[in-house]
Image (tube, rainbow, N blue to C red):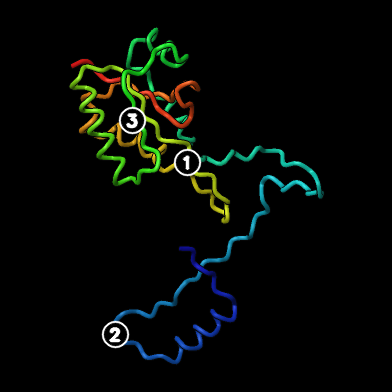
Amino acid sequence: MSRTRLTKEDVALWRKVADQAQRLHPENPKQTPSFPKPKPVEPPKRPIPDFTVGARAATRIPRNDLALGISERVARQPVQMDQKAFVKLKRGKIFPEGKIDLHGMTMSEAHPALIDFLFRSHAEGKRLVLVITGKGKQKLDDGPIPTRRGVLKHQVPQWLTLPSLRPIVLQLAEAHVKHGGKGAYYVYLRRK
């Protein structure tokens, strides 16, 4: 908190009030308050450059730190499985041994269905399964805040990182175009 400096009028008024006031403890010697002299205002060390309309700023403004899309986040996950098998997987050369289609399901229906399917597939010894989420409905963007398409597309990667599924899920990747592309995920399961 910065202190405000007293003006000459404030000091004169204070002295007038102090002269008329009676001391509570007359045995203490009379002391007059000392007021510091105001410091002169220094001009800024670096002058602000002149502004002209249409001129560009000298410094670059950092870009907004927006969250990555779900596809970029999944793609940036570290590879946990064999690198050669992962390259084959991304190229669509490995075919899924099972699939589940979550189209048309609500989150409360899709979550238990996905968990049941993954545990059943793991128990059967399957390694690669396909989870089809869909891309989400195309709708009009009526507001200034953008809304994400595809609730299940965004929720499935989060569900797969839950502690209950970590022991069986090894890798998650977006599916190749011939298996659904951006509307599906490959889930590579650990060995039994």
Q: Nearer the viewer, residue 147 or 55?
A: 147
Specify the label residue 25 is tagged with.
Answer: 2
Binning the other alpha carbons within 10 Å of mark 1 as few (below 14), some (14 to 19) or many (20 upward) gives some
**x and y percentages locating residue 161 in the rendered image:** 29, 32
Q: Quadrant of residue 62?
A: top right
Q: CA distance from mark 1 to mark 3?
A: 16 Å
Which of disc 3 and disc 1 is earlier in sequence?
A: 3
User: Which residue is depicted at the point 68% across and 45% down?
Assistant: 46
Number of callouts: 3
| Dots 1, 3 in contact, CB < 8 A | no
Give the residue pinned by disc 3: 100
Secondary structure state at the residue bearing disc 1: loop
Which of disc 2 and disc 3 is earlier in sequence?
A: 2
Under mark 1, the amino acid is: Gly
User: Which residue is depicted at the point 65% across and 55% down?
Assistant: 42
Left or right, 91 with respect to 162, comes to: right
Image quadrant holding the N terminus, namely: bottom left
**x and y percentages locating residue 177 in the rendered image:** 50, 22
Give the residue pinned by disc 1: 136
Binning the other alpha carbons within 10 Å of mark 3 as few (below 14), some (14 to 19) or many (20 upward) gives some
Binning the other alpha carbons within 10 Å of mark 2 as few (below 14), some (14 to 19) or many (20 upward) gives few
Q: Quadrant of residue 171?
A: top left
Under mark 3, the amino acid is: Ile
The answer to whether 63 is drawn above or below residue 77 in the figure is below
Q: CA distance from mark 3 to mark 2?
A: 90 Å
Which of disc 2 and disc 1 is earlier in sequence?
A: 2
Q: Nearer the viewer, residue 80 or 55?
A: 80
